[in-house]
Image (cartoon, rainbow, N blue to C red):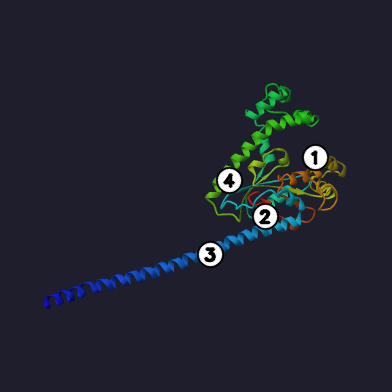
C-alpha cells in the first residue's frame, strides 16, 4: 500500500507540471487565434468597405455623366462597370476640327494637368514620306513616278501629290489607306519609347499619353485607345481663331472649315455649346467617342473643363456606365 501511494505521488508530481504547461499553451494559442480572426475580419471588412465606396463613386460619376449628356448614357447602356487596371499607362486620342483648339488642349493636359506626353500624329506622318521608306515606295507604286520631284529624285513633290488627292476623294482615300498603317506603326513605336522612359522617371499625376490627330475618327485606331475625346468649337469662334492665329481672311477660314466638314464634321453644327453635328452624334452613340470638350471660351475655362473630364472615369473605356 505504501508503495502504491508513493507511486501515485510520483506520477502526480511528474504529470501535473506538464498538464499546466499544456493548458497554458492551448489558452495562449486560442487567444492568439481569436485576436488574429478579429484582426483579419476587421481588415477584410475595411477592404470590403473601400471597394464598396469605390464602386459607389464610379456609379456616381456615371450618374453625373448621364445627367450631363443623354447621348453618352445611351451609348453605354450595354456596358458593365469594370475596374481599371492599376498603374496602366492610358492612351488617349484627341481630335477636333480646324480652329477647335485641340492642339492647345493637348498642350495644356501635358503642361498643366500632369499627363505624361503628347504625340502629334500629323507631324509623324511627315516621316512617312522620307526617301527610301516603304510607305514612299507604296505611294509611288500607286500614283506613279510623276509625283516625284524629278526623274532622278526619291522625294515626293507634295504639290503634285496634293493636286491629285485634294481634287479626287477616291485618290485621297487610296493615299490614306497607304499612309495610315505606317503612321500607326510610328505612333506605337513612340508610345513604347515614352513608356520605357517613364518607368525610370518620376511618376506623373496622370499616367496618360495623348495622341493628337486631326482625322483620328477616320483612322479606325480605336482599338489602341483607352478613350477618344473630341474638342469642338462654334464656327464663329473657329473662324475668329483662324483669322487671328493664321492670318486667314474670314472667307478663307470658312472655306477650310467647310472643306473639313465634308470629311468629318467635328465642329458645332450651329452656334452654342450644346449643338453638335449629326456625324459626331453617331460616333457618341456607337461608343467610339468617349467625351466631348467644348472650347468656346478662354484658355482658363478650357483648362477647367479638361481637368474635370480627366477626373471623370466614364470619359475612358476602362469604366463605363450602365
Q: Determine the secondary structure under disc 1.
A: helix
Among the two numbered marks 4 and 2 on one chain, the one whose residue lies closer to the N terminus: 4
Provide the residue designation for mark 4. 194
Please give the name of the residue rendered at 77% of the width and 29% of the height, measured from the top-left corner. 170
| In this rendering, the label closer to the viewer, 1 or 2 | 2
Q: Which mark is residue 260?
A: 1
Q: Which mark is residue 45?
A: 3
Quick check: 77 left or right of 204? right
Q: Determine the secondary structure under disc 2.
A: helix
- Pick out the residue farthest to the top: 151
**Crowd tier of the residue under label 2, counting other residues whose Cα lies within 10 Å: few below 14, some 14–19, many 20 or above:** some
The answer to whether 65 is drawn above or below residue 11 in the figure is above
Q: Determine the secondary structure under disc 3.
A: helix
For the residues bearing labels 2 and 3, Cβ distance under 8 angstroms: no
Among the two numbered marks 2 and 3 on one chain, the one whose residue lies closer to the N terminus: 3
Among the two numbered marks 4 and 1 on one chain, the one whose residue lies closer to the N terminus: 4
For the residues bearing labels 4 and 2, Cβ distance under 8 angstroms: no
Q: Quadrant of residue 93?
A: top right
Q: Position of residue 149 (x, y in %)?
A: 72, 26
Q: Could you tell me how far apart the alpha carbons at marks 4 and 1 are, in whole angstroms?
A: 31 Å
Q: Quadrant of residue 122?
A: top right
Among the two numbered marks 1 and 2 on one chain, the one whose residue lies closer to the N terminus: 1
Q: Determine the secondary structure under disc 4.
A: helix
| In this rendering, the label closer to the viewer, 3 or 4 | 3
Q: Could you tell me how far apart the alpha carbons at marks 3 and 4 are, in whole angstroms?
A: 40 Å
**Crowd tier of the residue under label 3, counting other residues whose Cα lies within 10 Å: few below 14, some 14–19, many 20 or above:** few
Q: Position of residue 144 (x, y in %)?
A: 72, 22
Among the two numbered marks 3 and 4 on one chain, the one whose residue lies closer to the N terminus: 3
Provide the residue designation for mark 2. 310
For the residues bearing labels 3 and 4, Cβ distance under 8 angstroms: no
Q: Could you tell me how far apart the alpha carbons at marks 4 and 2 are, in whole angstroms?
A: 20 Å
The image quadrant where one finds the N terminus is bottom left
Amino acid at each position: 500500500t505504501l508503495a502504491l501511494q508513493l507511486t501515485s505521488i510520483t506520477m502526480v508530481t511528474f504529470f501535473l507540471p506538464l498538464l499546466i504547461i499544456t493548458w497554458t499553451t492551448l489558452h495562449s494559442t486560442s487567444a492568439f487565434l481569436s485576436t488574429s480572426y478579429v484582426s483579419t475580419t476587421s481588415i477584410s471588412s475595411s477592404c470590403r468597405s473601400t471597394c464598396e465606396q469605390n464602386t459607389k463613386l464610379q456609379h456616381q460619376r456615371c450618374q453625373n455623366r448621364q445627367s450631363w449628356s443623354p447621348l453618352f448614357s445611351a451609348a453605354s447602356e450595354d456596358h458593365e462597370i469594370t475596374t481599371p487596371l492599376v498603374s496602366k499607362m492610358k492612351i488617349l486620342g484627341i481630335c477636333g476640327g480646324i480652329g477647335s483648339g485641340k492642339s492647345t488642349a493637348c498642350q495644356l493636359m501635358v503642361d498643366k494637368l500632369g499627363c505624361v506626353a503628347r504625340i502629334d500624329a500629323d507631324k509623324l506622318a511627315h516621316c512617312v514620306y522620307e526617301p527610301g521608306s516603304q510607305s514612299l515606295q507604296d505611294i509611288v507604286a500607286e500614283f506613279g513616278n510623276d509625283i516625284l520631284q524629278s526623274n532622278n529624285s526619291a522625294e515626293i513633290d507634295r504639290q503634285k501629290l496634293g493636286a491629285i488627292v485634294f481634287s479626287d476623294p477616291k485618290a485621297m482615300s487610296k493615299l490614306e489607306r497607304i499612309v495610315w498603317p505606317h503612321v500607326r506603326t510610328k505612333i506605337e513605336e513612340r508610345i513604347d519609347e515614352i513608356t520605357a522612359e517613364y518607368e525610370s522617371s518620376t511618376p506623373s499625376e496622370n499616367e496618360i499619353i495623348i495622341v493628337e490627330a486631326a482625322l483620328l475618327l477616320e483612322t479606325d485606331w480605336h482599338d489602341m485607345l483607352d478613350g477618344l475625346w473630341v474638342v469642338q468649337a462654334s464656327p464663329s469662334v473657329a473662324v475668329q481663331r483662324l483669322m487671328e492665329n493664321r492670318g486667314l481672311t474670314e472667307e478663307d477660314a470658312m472655306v477650310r472649315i467647310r472643306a473639313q466638314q465634308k470629311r468629318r464634321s467635328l465642329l458645332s453644327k450651329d452656334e452654342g455649346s450644346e449643338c453638335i453635328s449629326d456625324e459626331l452624334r453617331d460616333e457618341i452613340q456607337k461608343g467610339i467617342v468617349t467625351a466631348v470638350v467644348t472650347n468656346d471660351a478662354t484658355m482658363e475655362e478650357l483648362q477647367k473643363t479638361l481637368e474635370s473630364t480627366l477626373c471623370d472615369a466614364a470619359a475612358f473605356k476602362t469604366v463605363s456606365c450602365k
